[in-house]
Image: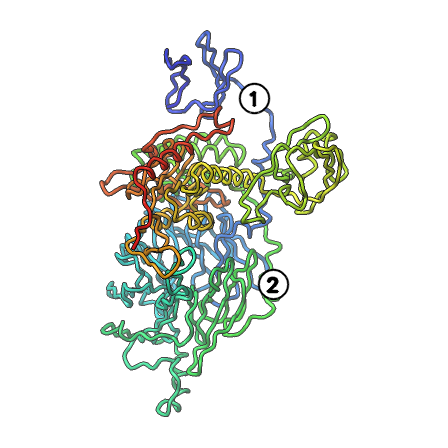
């Protein structure tokens, strides 16, 4: 428990002044010999001289407007799932944890759930169209429940044994079974009639792709990761409880889909491994890149079946009508010959693509496709099931998700915040607007008190179910819930709720945690202020341009607005007016640069060198922070170039995300042949690309090439042959720390600077509340070959400790960079590494 303590400036005379237990002292503030602080949800006052400590009684009259009934008037902002009924005539929508049934055409929207103290997830129709099934946390755990589609009843609970997060329920065509998985990586089948549950598969590697029921509800096809992480298609028999693998662990196979006649199982598999890059020779060491890996395959479930995609020949030309009649028979019990099943696999004769989400109806295969490198939605694509040459047809563009109705006749498309229902056929939808589901009148109220309590318990439970250590770091997690529920009852705003949830997460004593977002009320006066890309100081004659931020001249599009050489603006010039308004008429120039909308502004400048005035047009930027950071980065690089006399290269990585690969390619490859290299990960915010960069730094030159002219080159291409160091400080976080630790453990060089932040349990952003709020959960602990946890709460201690002291750093010094340059210069002098001659 955190309490108030004191000590002298030299660290002596340590005393404890408060002795609270259970609740931490928070946010202390000192004034006039007294300290006011927060304890639980109260304020307390401590008198230093007397030692008196007491509650500050505060009574505030308020109508607590943020606790009033709240109307959600934009439910699509909170939509978590949408599903069709069997005929494609209605939708079940789950938004903000509430369940609604909406007609595709005209009609009223029905609220099927009426408990604001419960969150519903993954709600779908049963085949009868009258009943819904989904997850609800009304009991405190996520349990499978039913609801009435007409909203007349809250329904009933099917399960009551929940201890872990359940998800992804798939109902069988006959409505008897529901397949789902959970956070223990177990796959279950639930009998919706009896409530009995059968464990289908324990897969600690996880499940891949979607799953699919056979038309007769007797078989479940699903993707299961093998020990080598490749996903295989598995068939499970409900009758016998036996499983059989349809595909091997040599490739990834996902998205199984049953042909409606039960003769074929279709799936996607990444077997088209044709790299667009065929050689490592080229600038910046080109890497293999595999575009359009996915192909569609079909498995004959019995021997002797002819693929519907196989072209007719003289022996089968007269059998078309019979085959078509058989294809339309949906009532036949499926007979699968398991012996030799994988050998009966054939590729559907269409080109490969970046496919996902395969489904099948009587007439076509449907799937999503996208071009390499494209962002956002995909193309919904179809191919008719025909013995003639198949042709890919784009049904709709920019589709985020889609679903085929159970009868195969309709499709639900998600496109941004809009939903569309179209006919399911291999043809362009055309004019999607007329197929849009009208939800313009959809709005609903919520009880805020009940909502706050549900969000709290939901995020507490998600923290439990996703945390990497099932023992919760030794914390009694149920006791934590009960303790903080008392504070939830005193919460009056969503921000206060986030504060309480943050304290709950803090009980785990783990980094990589944060609480943010949600349905927080915001004002309308958050007006952005643009920047001229310079350090500006107020004077009696105008605003003085003290310094214009520098950037890499190789990328002029990133320069400061005032650095444009065509403007001729220099440090020392005075800004006297913006758009004709005297800058001295406002307290700060930012008041004249508010909400510019990307438009240029007119500046009146006066040169301090010759006193002349002129006007220029400048387009301000919203990237002031990025410009300051680029200036810091560029000036470090120039300092290394100058003092290293061209022998030492410099690379700085602000973070370890996908966008930071650009920085790596820009900065490393131009200096790969230097004698020394500084990789600066100070202030690095983390990410996940450490292995990519470490792999490049581990490359070694083992042979050399020498032609008639020019300097020798070597293999491995762009291997760094010199000496390397990593710069790190106390703000180096997450994957920045992992990179520095890997650099040292792999023997690539020394780490210089200060002990890092200390957060190394990896995580994702999937633990969200019904209102979109996030309580991030550490999900994957990291340990070394010796079996000890790495970095977490300790940080990485550098080989050479150098601190950048505040005053010296403020004055422009960089002791850590100085130390790195000196260290490499000594290394180069002691162990020069020239290219060996032939």
Picture quadrant of residue 486: top left
Question: Percent x, y for residue 743?
Answer: 32, 42
x and y, in percent, of residue 534 in the image: 61, 36
Dot 1 or dot 2: first in sequence order is: 1
Rendered image quadrant of residue 227:
bottom left
Q: How is the image coloured?
A: rainbow
- Label 2: which residue? 106
Is 364 left, or right, of 430 in this rendering? left
Front residue of this view, candidates 164 and 527: 527
Name of the residue lying farthest toward the front:
708
Taking the view exactly as shown, the residue that stands out farthest to the top is 50
Describe residue 639's horizontal placement relative to residue 239 as left or right.
right
Q: Is residue 781 visible?
A: no
Mark 1 highlights which residue?
59
Within 10 angstroms of label 1, few (less than 14), some, or many (20 or more) residues?
A: few
Q: Is residue 660 above or below residue 386?
A: above
Crowding near the residue tagged with mark 2, few <14, some 14–19, many ≥20 C-alpha atoms within 10 Å:
few
- Mark 1 element type: loop
**What residue is shown at x 44% (from left), y 72% (from top)?**
365
């Amino acid at each position: 428990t955190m309490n108030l303590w004191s000590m002298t400036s030299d660290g002596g005379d340590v005393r404890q002044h408060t002795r609270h237990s259970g609740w931490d002292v928070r946010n202390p503030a000192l004034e006039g010999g007294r300290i006011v602080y927060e304890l639980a949800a109260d304020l307390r006052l401590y008198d230093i001289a007397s030692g008196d400590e007491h509650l500050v009684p505060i009574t505030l009259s308020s109508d607590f407007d943020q606790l009033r009934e709240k109307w959600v008037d934009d439910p699509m902002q909170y939509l978590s799932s949408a599903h069709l009924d069997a005929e494609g005539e209605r939708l079940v929508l789950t938004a903000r944890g509430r369940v609604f049934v909406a007609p595709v055409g005209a009609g009223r929207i029905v609220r099927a759930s009426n408990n604001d103290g419960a969150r519903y997830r993954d709600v779908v129709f049963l085949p009868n169209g009258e009943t819904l099934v989904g997850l609800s946390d009304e009991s405190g755990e996520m349990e499978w429940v039913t609801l009435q589609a007409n909203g007349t009843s809250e329904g009933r609970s099917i399960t009551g044994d929940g201890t872990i997060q359940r998800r992804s329920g798939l109902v069988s065509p006959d409505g008897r079974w529901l397949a789902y998985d959970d956070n223990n990586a177990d796959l279950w089948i639930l009998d919706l009639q009896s409530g009995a549950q059968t464990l289908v598969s324990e897969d600690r590697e996880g499940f891949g792709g979607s799953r699919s029921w056979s038309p007769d509800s007797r078989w479940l096809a699903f993707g299961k990761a093998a020990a080598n992480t490749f996903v295989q298609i598995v068939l499970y028999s409900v009758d016998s409880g036996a499983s059989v693998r349809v595909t091997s662990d040599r490739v990834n196979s996902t998205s199984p889909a049953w042909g409606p006649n039960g003769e074929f199982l279709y799936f996607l598999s990444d077997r088209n491994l044709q790299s667009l890059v065929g050689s490592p020779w080229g600038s910046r060491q080109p890497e293999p890149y595999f575009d359009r890996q996915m192909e569609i395959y079909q498995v004959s479930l019995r021997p002797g079946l002819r693929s519907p995609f196989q072209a007719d020949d003289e022996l089968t030309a007269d059998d078309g009508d019979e085959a078509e009649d058989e294809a339309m028979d949906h009532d036949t019990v499926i007979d699968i010959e398991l012996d030799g099943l994988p050998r009966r696999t054939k590729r559907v004769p269409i080109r490969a693509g970046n496919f996902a989400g395969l489904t099948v109806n009587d007439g076509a295969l449907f799937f999503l496709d996208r071009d390499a490198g494209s962002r956002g939605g995909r193309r919904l694509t179809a191919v008719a099931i025909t013995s003639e040459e198949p042709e890919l047809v784009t049904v709709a563009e920019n589709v985020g998700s889609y679903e085929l109705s159970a009868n195969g006749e309709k499709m639900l498309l998600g496109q941004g915040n809009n939903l569309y229902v179209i006919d399911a056929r291999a043809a362009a939808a055309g004019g999607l607007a007329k197929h849009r589901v009208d939800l313009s009148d959809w709005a609903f109220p919520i009880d805020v008190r009940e909502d706050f309590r549900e969000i709290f318990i939901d995020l507490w439970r998600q923290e439990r179910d996703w945390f990497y250590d099932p023992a919760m770091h030794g914390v009694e997690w149920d006791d934590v819930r009960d303790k903080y529920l008392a504070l939830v009852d005193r919460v009056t705003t969503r921000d206060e709720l986030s504060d309480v949830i943050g304290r709950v997460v803090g009980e785990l004593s783990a980094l990589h945690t944060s609480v943010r977002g949600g349905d927080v009320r915001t004002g309308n006066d958050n007006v952005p202020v643009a920047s001229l890309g310079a350090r500006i100081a107020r004077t009696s004659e105008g605003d003085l341009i003290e310094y214009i931020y520098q950037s890499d001249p190789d990328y002029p599009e990133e320069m400061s607005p005032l650095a444009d050489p065509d403007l001729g603006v220099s440090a020392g010039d005075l800004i006297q007016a913006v758009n004709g308004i005297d800058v001295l008429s406002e307290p700060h120039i930012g008041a004249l640069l508010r909400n510019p909308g990307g438009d240029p502004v007119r500046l009146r400048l006066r040169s301090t060198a010759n006193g002349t005035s002129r006007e220029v047009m400048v387009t301000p930027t919203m990237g002031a922070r990025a410009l300051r950071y680029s200036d810091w980065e560029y000036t470090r690089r120039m300092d290394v170039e100058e003092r290293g006399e061209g022998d030492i290269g410099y690379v700085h990585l602000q973070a370890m995300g996908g966008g930071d690969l650009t920085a790596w390619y820009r900065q490393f490859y131009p200096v790969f042949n230097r004698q020394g290299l500084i990789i600066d990960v100070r202030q690095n915010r983390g990410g996940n690309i450490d292995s990519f960069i470490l792999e490049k730094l581990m490359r070694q030159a083992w042979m050399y090439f020498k032609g008639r002219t020019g300097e020798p080159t070597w293999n491995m291409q762009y291997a760094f042959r010199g000496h390397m160091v990593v710069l790190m400080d106390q703000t180096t976080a997450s994957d920045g720390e992992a990179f520095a630790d890997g650099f040292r453990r792999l023997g690539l060089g020394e780490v210089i600077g200060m002990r890092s932040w200390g957060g190394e349990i990896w995580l994702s952003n999937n633990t969200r509340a019904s209102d979109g709020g996030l309580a991030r959960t550490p999900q994957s602990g990291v340990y070394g070959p010796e079996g000890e946890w790495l970095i977490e709460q300790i940080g990485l201690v550098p080989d050479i400790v150098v601190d950048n002291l505040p005053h010296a750093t403020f004055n422009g010094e960089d002791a850590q960079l100085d130390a790195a340059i000196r260290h490499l210069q000594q290394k180069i002098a002691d162990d020069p590494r020239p290219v060996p001659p032939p």
